[in-house]
């Protein structure tokens, strides 16, 4: 048994993969399924919102004004960022289980409320929609640190990476489910209401029944969240929180004995001894935290920030991909329901071909390759493919080369998911002390969402044509130069990955130094370079 590790934690680390592991993955994963559905389904209906509420009586479809579109699409990200910080902190103060139920109920209530923005006035509808989307994001934000922390504290050290990655991989199925459900709703309404093609009777292509489509799609997100609530409340608190933070050895041993079906000694005396050590009592804003984990937190926060800038910037050229391969036609040639159907079909195909496979490659290989190698590889490949898109960008705009553009686009985001999009979620749940684990994961995740806002909206404005920007936008530097900047962002991700330690095969207490007998065993700022070199040799 390493150092002074408690018997209950040692039993968890060495436990064989069994039924309770898969139960935990499903319970935590369904939260991420819902998170992804709720965050990404708005992109399926924004064009429909423009047709319904901003039709000007011309022979062109209504379009959301640039500022309204930015608000509708970004407000949930702002809420998510806030929720990650707040619930991450609360998870360390109140316990993972207590807070876990709160986040889910917020998501259920706000998913339903998002679809109940009833009014004929565009301003009223958009205001109430944004209000509830913010609080929906607030609940979603709490799911990030809590799901990752709970799964890491339940898992054994041999397959912990795969278990946390599997929880995060449910995000891919959430995106896929959003596209499939939108396909079903749009095709059902299209069949029920005989809408003429746009070029024949443009004013009739958005019947009043279309207003129900976006409401049904948004409200559906409440169902998987509600179904998960009961099982989340049945989960026992993690042994690591109960023993190392709440300092209740008896309850930790009792809970895990029932889960693992073995006899476990309580060891209250050892719990008191461990938690009273000065090195196990420092706070987040202490010099000791800065010495031991300052570079780690900098590494997890910056890599997640840089990754999400690149990952969420896909909006810059997603429409070019869809139009180039004929998945989406020009808006003035489609009815409202047909447009929703084709956008949903495109998202579904992208999820099937690129998003979902990337996640599950990570699940399969992370405990073999290690977090460090996968993240380094992912950022490196994204850098290469972004430069390959940027440097000959005019070449890719030629119709004869459109399929090459699509291939590079797909590979970029395959290696994002089989790379830093997964590992940036996993690592912060493994390397910090139990009493600060949820907080530090929340800080790292919030940095990521800040990057998402910069990538999705800052770069959207930056990518506008310097001569002919889209309506509502100012002049930018163009897509070619924007892609070059994004390639440099990915290259920075490679460099900051060097600050992130490898956790493969190690217990959480080994990574955080909580059960080490002296300071020499803890990973500090001074031995970061040596540690990285040693890890590179051992995983080669």
Image: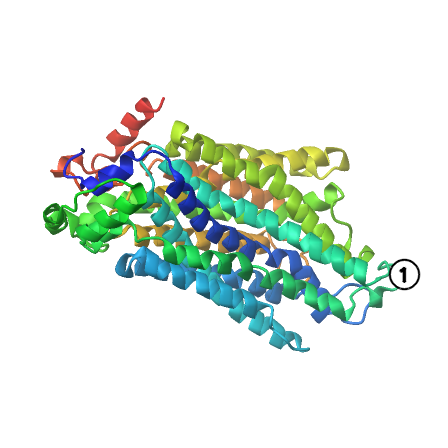
Visual colour scheme:
rainbow
Vertical relation: 28 (above or below) 21: below
Residue 472 figure quarter: bottom right
Say which residue appears at 17% left-offset and 35% top-offset.
Answer: 521
User: For the C terminus, which image quadrant?
Assistant: top left
In the depicted view, which residue is nearer to us: 315 or 435? 435
Say which residue appears at 60% left-offset and 53% top-offset.
Answer: 476
Q: Where is residue 247 in the image (x, y as percent from the top left)?
A: 18, 54
Residue 260 figure quarter: top left
Tell me if residue 97 can be seen: yes
The residue that disc 1 covers is: 200
Q: Position of residue 293 (x, y in %)?
A: 25, 45
Q: Position of residue 403 (x, y in %)?
A: 71, 34
Say which residue appears at 87% left-offset and 59% top-offset.
Answer: 199
In the depicted view, which residue is nearer to us: 226 or 349? 226
Tell me if residue 386 can be seen: no
User: For the N terminus, which image quadrant?
Assistant: top left
In the depicted view, which residue is nearer to us: 9 or 523? 9
Q: In this view, does 297 lie to the left or right of 248?
A: right
């Amino acid at each position: 048994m390493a150092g002074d590790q408690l018997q209950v934690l040692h039993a968890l680390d060495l436990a064989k993969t069994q039924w309770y592991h898969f139960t935990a993955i499903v319970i935590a994963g369904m939260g991420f399924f819902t998170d992804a559905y709720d965050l990404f389904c708005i992109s399926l209906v924004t064009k429909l919102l423009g047709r319904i509420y901003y039709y000007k009586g011309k022979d062109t479809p209504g379009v959301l004004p640039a500022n309204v579109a930015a608000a509708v699409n970004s407000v949930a990200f702002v809420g998510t960022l806030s929720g990650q910080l707040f619930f991450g902190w609360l998870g360390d103060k109140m316990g993972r289980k207590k807070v876990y139920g709160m986040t889910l109920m917020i998501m259920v209530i706000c998913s339903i409320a998002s679809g109940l923005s009833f009014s004929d006035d565009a301003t009223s509808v958009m205001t109430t929609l944004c209000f509830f989307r913010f609080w929906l994001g607030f609940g979603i934000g709490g799911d990030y640190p809590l799901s990752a922390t709970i799964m890491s504290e339940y898992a054994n050290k041999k397959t912990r990476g795969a278990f946390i990655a599997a929880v995060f991989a449910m995000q891919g199925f959430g995106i896929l489910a959003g596209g499939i459900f939108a396909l079903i709703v749009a095709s059902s309404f299209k069949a029920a209401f005989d809408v003429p093609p746009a070029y024949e009777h443009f004013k009739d292509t958005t019947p009043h029944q279309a207003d129900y489509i976006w409401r049904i799609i948004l409200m559906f997100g409440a169902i998987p969240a509600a179904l998960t609530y009961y099982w989340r409340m049945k989960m026992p608190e993690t042994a690591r929180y109960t023993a190392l933070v709440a300092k209740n050895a008896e309850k930790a041993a009792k809970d895990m004995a029932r889960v693992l079906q073995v006899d476990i000694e309580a060891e209250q005396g050892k719990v008191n001894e461990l938690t009273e050590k000065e090195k196990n009592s420092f706070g987040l804003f202490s010099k000791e935290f800065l010495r031991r984990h300052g570079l780690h937190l900098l590494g997890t926060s910056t890599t997640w920030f840089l990754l999400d800038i690149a990952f969420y910037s896909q909006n810059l050229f997603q429409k070019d991909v869809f139009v180039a391969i004929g998945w989406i036609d020009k808006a003035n040639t489609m009815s409202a329901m047909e447009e929703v159907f084709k956008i949903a079909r495109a998202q579904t195909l992208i999820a099937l071909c690129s998003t979902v496979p990337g996640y599950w490659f990570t699940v399969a290989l992370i405990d073999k390759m290690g977090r460090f190698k996968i993240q380094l590889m992912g950022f490196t490949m994204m850098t290469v493919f972004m430069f390959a898109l940027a440097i000959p960008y005019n070449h890719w705009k030629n119709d004869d080369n459109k399929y090459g553009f699509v291939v590079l686009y797909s590979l970029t985001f395959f290696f994002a998911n089989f790379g830093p999009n997964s590992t940036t979620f996993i690592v912060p749940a493994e390397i910090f002390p139990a009493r600060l684990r949820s907080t530090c994961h929340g800080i790292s995740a919030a940095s990521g969402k800040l990057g998402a806002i910069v990538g999705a909206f800052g770069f959207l404005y930056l990518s506008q044509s310097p001569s002919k920007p889209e309506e509502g936008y100012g002049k930018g530097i163009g897509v070619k130069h924007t892609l070059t900047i994004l390639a440099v962002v990915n290259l920075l991700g490679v460099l900051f990955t060097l600050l992130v330690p490898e956790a493969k095969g190690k217990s959480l207490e080994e990574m955080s130094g909580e059960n080490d007998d002296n300071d020499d065993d803890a990973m500090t700022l001074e031995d970061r370079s040596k540690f990285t070199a040693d890890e590179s040799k051992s995983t080669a």
